[in-house]
Image: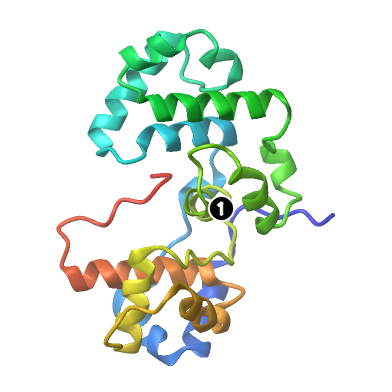
Amino acid sequence: MPRHARGFDTQAAWDHLTRRDRRLGAWMKRIGMLEAEPRWRMTFDPVDALARAILFQQLSGKAASTIVGRVEQAIGSRRLHFDTLGRVDDAGLRACGVSGNKTLALRDLAAREQRGEIPTLRQMQHMHHDQIVEALVPVRGIGRWTVEMMLMFRLGRPDILPIDDLGIRKGAQLVDQAALMPTPKALAARGERWGPYRTYASLYLWRIADFDSKAAAPTNRSQD
């Protein structure tokens, strides 16, 4: 099976997108070239990342970080896995501020890890991104969007387009000067010309949406 490298050539992605899509290319030139994501070269632990994604859901970054810190203290480790999460019972997790639903999600993740159902980073290197999505979305509390963020920001897969993301859809609307945001299905069709660098196009669509809203700070993403 082919081995998928973490990351891609951003210059090649820039050249491809500016050549293939005049409207997006004009925005890209206005924003400037985005550099490679440094996390593509960093050590990455899929189980730990999924556990943290569960804990961060529907909370502000500050509140979630506080809860994660309490969980780390309760288990005596900064590594969230089957063996370490097993050091604290459900009542202990609730005392850390973890909701009942998130506790169930963490237990499901841990059980699946124990059964060997969560691919390791080494295994992911030989899996197509659709296979990774298929393997991870059955985990309670983990949806396709969360896995897509992992694929983009941690694994550096070059051809991911999160068609359900509102920021992506807003950016595409602005690029095409449309009255309404495209539906996910329409966005998938629109993005065909961006392949095989839909990840790089997505990074620009987020920037375009933030630029339009004149946000004081960039929109937070999962995996940040």
Q: Residue furthest bottom?
A: 22
Q: Residue furthest right?
A: 1
What's the residue at 53%, 71% (across, down)?
198
Percent x, y for residue 222?
Answer: 40, 47
> Which one is in front, 97 or 193?
97
Scheme by which the image is coloured:
rainbow
Q: Is residue 169 above or below residue 123?
A: below
What's the residue at 67%, 45% (across, down)?
135
Percent x, y for residue 143?
Answer: 50, 48
Percent x, y for residue 116?
Answer: 73, 29
What's the residue type where badge 1 is placed? Leu
Q: Is residue 16 visible to us here?
A: no
Relative placement, left or right, of 108 versus 200 is: right
| Element type at mark 1 | helix
Q: Quadrant of residue 27?
A: bottom left
Q: Which residue is mark 1?
A: 151
> Which one is in front, 95 or 222?
95
Labels in figure, total: 1
What's the residue at 35%, 23% (across, down)?
98
Location of the N terminus by quadrant is bottom right
Q: Residues within 10 Å of mark 1 (few under 14, many from 20)?
A: many
Q: Quadrant of residue 58?
A: top left
Q: Quadrant of residue 112?
A: top right
Percent x, y for residue 62?
Answer: 23, 33
